[in-house]
Image (cartoon, grey):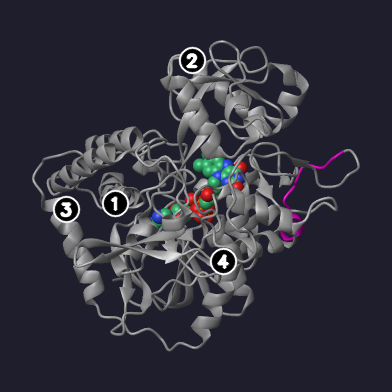
Amino acid sequence: MRAGMRGHDVLVVGAGLAGMRAALEAQAKGVDVAIMSKVYPVRSHSNAAQGGINAALSEEDSWESHAFDTVKGSDYLGDQDAIEILAKEAPQAIIELENFGVPFNRDETGRLGSRNFGGASHARTYFVGDFTGQAILHVMYEQLLKHGVTSYDEWFVLELARDDEGAVRGVVALDIKRGTIELVPAKAVILATGGLGRVYEPSTNALIVTGDGMALAYRAGAPLMDMEMVQFHPTTLKSNGALLSEAARGEGAYLINKHGERFMKKSAPIKMELASRDVVSRAEQIEINEGRGVDGCVLLDMRHLGAAKIMERLPQVRELALEFAGVDIIHEPVPVRPGMHYQMGGVKTDVWGQTEIPGLFAAGETACVSVHGGNRLGANSLLETVVFGKRAGAKAAEYAKGQKEPRLSQSWVTDQEKRIKALFDRPPGEKAAALRLEMGTIMTRNVGVFRSAEGLEEARETILRLKERFARVSVQDKGRVYNSNLLSVLELENMLELAHVIIESALFRTESRGAHYRTDYPERDDENWLKHTLVRYRDGQHELSTLPVTITRWQPQVRQY
Ligand SMILES: Cc1cc2nc3c(=O)[nH]c(=O)nc-3n(C[C@H](O)[C@H](O)[C@H](O)COP(=O)(O)OP(=O)(O)OC[C@H]3O[C@@H](n4cnc5c(N)ncnc54)[C@H](O)[C@@H]3O)c2cc1C
């Protein structure tokens, strides 16, 4: 440990939108705040968000309508108290972003312009072209700089440090630039480490999205909730899994099969292409499986939108299709297929971001509040990051004010030093990249849009074998400075644990709900499964249990689009 490493009141791990919003709010409450990120803050995956952010802002819309759409989108698995907060606080959150300086698109009358998005009964998605996440993240970063929040850029958290009572009181982290291991004490820690996309291959998520925070919390004893709920986005490119934003369908794009038929009329006659993502992804996979696809894909057709609209509203979609599929969407339909996009589950928290472990908070994609339940609506995730990031920041600051200076054993550092040394000392053996690809491939094949006991058990066996092989994974690069080889090994260990948790949760839920479709249990079963799944780590084992869903005013109905 570097001598004199200063402690903080609140340490936020993760500098995406959830982390930045949490840090700003905690700072505003007058405590000492720091933010830590394994990549330079504005490289966080929030930067990649394209389509927009939801809020019931217009007079014709209402928070109740937004909340109901979200409840229905979640296939009734979302907690309705949390969803009410999300929808009620959304308009204020958008105005706040606008006041920070986010240049949202405007309509002809000069008011904030909105677009349609999947599963929504009103056009309530606010956007900046098709690079909304980038615009918000950069503006938020300016706010962090303006308010002087301490930033640990390119630090990788290895472990949550706990005191004798088991409360989280800081982190042990690798300073990537120097290669040293440091203890950073804090009275409260907020995990805002994003999703786990790269457990699957391919994924729309950046390579850095490896579920570290979920794995850290899990190993420290915090339960993970609804981990079987993995979203496959309907429009990803075959070549590299890159996302073509839902904004395309929001602006009016069609999905067609090889006969030129708009097949969504079979499963969602009213909403068609703008049904919720789980519904559209399943419909596409059926077309592909039954031989009506084109080379393992269906077609996304935007020709009728015209060049002017495409260039104004969807420039990035055009660029991505051109670069990675060689298709100009102005003139041709582009092949797309469902691809892993988002983890609805995560570290279980209350509506203030508190986990079951004192001193540990979580927000953003890492957390499960739960507002998305079995299926997230497009543009509700950016909203979740700012609404619940802010709440977690406020609560963590309040909590920290009542705590004494952390007292932590030096063994937190020496244990991690031993762990890293052991990795370096391993003789040449397995390569992390090979294991990562095998893991991601079986997860997509057997734990994807369609699942069955047989396929899930096969996936479990594969993951168990990969875990064994992980003991022989070596770090070829022995340098200490910027050792990305070492990082990829550490990330793989986290991802293998989470893959295992996803499979156990998917085997446990013997029904079909939201994104979790079991071909051997094809019906939703409210009698037995209107429940969250919880997984805890006990003595090296996954312990599964359930928790009731919070229902405030919307009773489950048959879900049709
Ligand atoms: C291509 C794409 C497009 C999307 N489009 C939309 C959209 O239009 N609308 C919408 O609502 N949602 C969208 N989403 C989803 C949404 O962008 C994400 O869910 C959201 O941005 C997650 O934000 P976050 O703050 O939770 O995490 P992230 O932005 O992923 O940030 C995670 C942070 O944690 C840090 N971190 C992780 N592990 C460690 C570690 N071990 N040590 C230190 N730091 C660590 C990272 O460095 C990073 O700073 C999209 C997602 C993708 C992938």
The answer to whether marks 2 and 4 mark residues whose Cβ atoms lie closer than 8 Å is: no
Label 2 vs 3, first from the N-terminus: 2
The range drawn in magenta is: 94-107
Question: Is residue 353 left or right of 109 when viewed as pictured?
Answer: left
Mark 2 surroundings: few (<14), some (14-19) or many (≥20) residues within 10 A: many
The amino acid marked with disc number 1 is Glu
Mark 3 surroundings: few (<14), some (14-19) or many (≥20) residues within 10 A: many
The answer to whether marks 3 and 4 mark residues whose Cβ atoms lie closer than 8 Å is: no
Find the distance from the CA under tag 2 to the CA under tag 3: 49 Å
The answer to whether marks 1 and 2 mark residues whose Cβ atoms lie closer than 8 Å is: no
| Residue at numbered disc 4 | 22
Check residue 504 in the rendering and tell me which mark sits there, or answer none. 1
The amino acid marked with disc number 2 is Arg
Find the distance from the CA under tag 1 to the CA under tag 3: 28 Å
Question: Can residue 116 be seen?
Answer: yes
Label 4 vs 1, first from the N-terminus: 4
Check residue 423 in the rendering and tell me which mark sits there, or answer none. 3
Disc 4 secondary structure class:
helix
Find the distance from the CA under tag 2 to the CA under tag 4: 47 Å
